């Protein structure tokens, strides 16, 4: 018999695949049960409400997403190259099979108006991303306001890539980020 952490991970793996691939509202707890192989009784013991499962899915995905971003950015040595590496990371992510846009934007779009937990997860994730960008622009000697502008470029690229199914918006956003950094020097 698997321990609680392994079963929880199994459920979250299934939830992530289904929620990200099909959308949250179209996936029922029975779908999660079928994909995870965990009984409905055990599933509800772990997550008494679907909203709690959605929250746990977004929390876990946040950790992985931010770690992958930092791993890519940390490969660059120059501070401005590190800023641009954010967009290189986005380009690679957008090109992955099964890319469906940003999980937090998608979740917020589906449930943000009715689920305080989902709205809070989206805000927490986007705030953490902004803080990360603030650290990068500070290291690069850029005005702090540049981080908010970079956030808008990145978020716009995420939405556009998700809608059009192409990684190209990350390249356009990278070009705009380079122009923005150049303008900050004047």
Image (cartoon, rainbow, N blue to C red):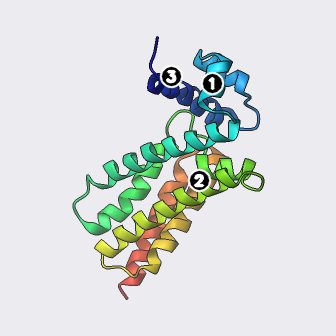
Q: Is residue 168 visible?
A: yes
Q: Residue furthest front?
A: 45
**What secondary structure is marked by label 3?**
helix
Q: CA distance from mark 2 to mark 3?
A: 23 Å
The residue sitting at the bottom extreme is: 186
Q: Is residue 69 left or right of residue 11?
A: left
Q: Spot the residue most to the left.
A: 77
Which residue is identified by label 3?
A: 7
Pointer 2 or 1: first along the chain: 1
The numbered mark, 2 or 3, whose residue comes first in the sequence reads 3
Q: In this view of the protein, which residue sits in the foreground, 104 or 55?
A: 55
At numbered mark 2, what does the secondary structure look like: helix, strand or loop? helix
Residue position marked by numbered label 1 in the rendering: 43
Q: Are marks 3 and 1 in contact (CB under 8 Å)?
A: no
Rendered residue at 55%/55% (across/down):
169
Residue at the image point whose x is 29% and y is 72% from the top: 139
Q: Is residue 186 above or below residue 6?
A: below
Mark 3 or mark 1, earlier in chain:
3
- The secondary structure type at the circle numbered 1 is helix
Q: CA distance from mark 3 to mark 1?
A: 9 Å
């Amino acid at each position: 018999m698997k321990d609680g952490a392994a079963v929880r991970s199994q459920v979250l793996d299934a939830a992530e695949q289904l929620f990200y691939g099909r959308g949250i509202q179209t996936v029922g707890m029975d779908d999660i049960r079928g994909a995870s192989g965990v009984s409905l009784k055990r599933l509800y013991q772990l997550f008494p409400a679907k909203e709690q499962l959605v929250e746990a899915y977004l929390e876990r995905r946040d950790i992985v997403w931010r770690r992958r971003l930092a791993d890519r950015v940390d490969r660059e040595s120059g501070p401005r190259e590190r800023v641009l590496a954010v967009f290189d990371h986005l380009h690679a992510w957008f090109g992955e099979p099964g890319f469906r846009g940003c999980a937090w934007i998608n979740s917020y779009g589906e449930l943000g108006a009715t689920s305080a937990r989902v709205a809070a997860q989206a805000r927490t994730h986007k705030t953490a991303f902004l803080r990360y960008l603030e650290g990068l622009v500070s290291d690069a000697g850029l005005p702090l306001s540049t981080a908010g502008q970079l956030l808008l470029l990145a978020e716009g690229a995420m939405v556009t890539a998700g809608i059009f199914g192409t990684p190209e918006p990350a390249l356009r956003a990278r070009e705009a980020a380079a122009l923005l950094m150049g303008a900050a020097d004047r």
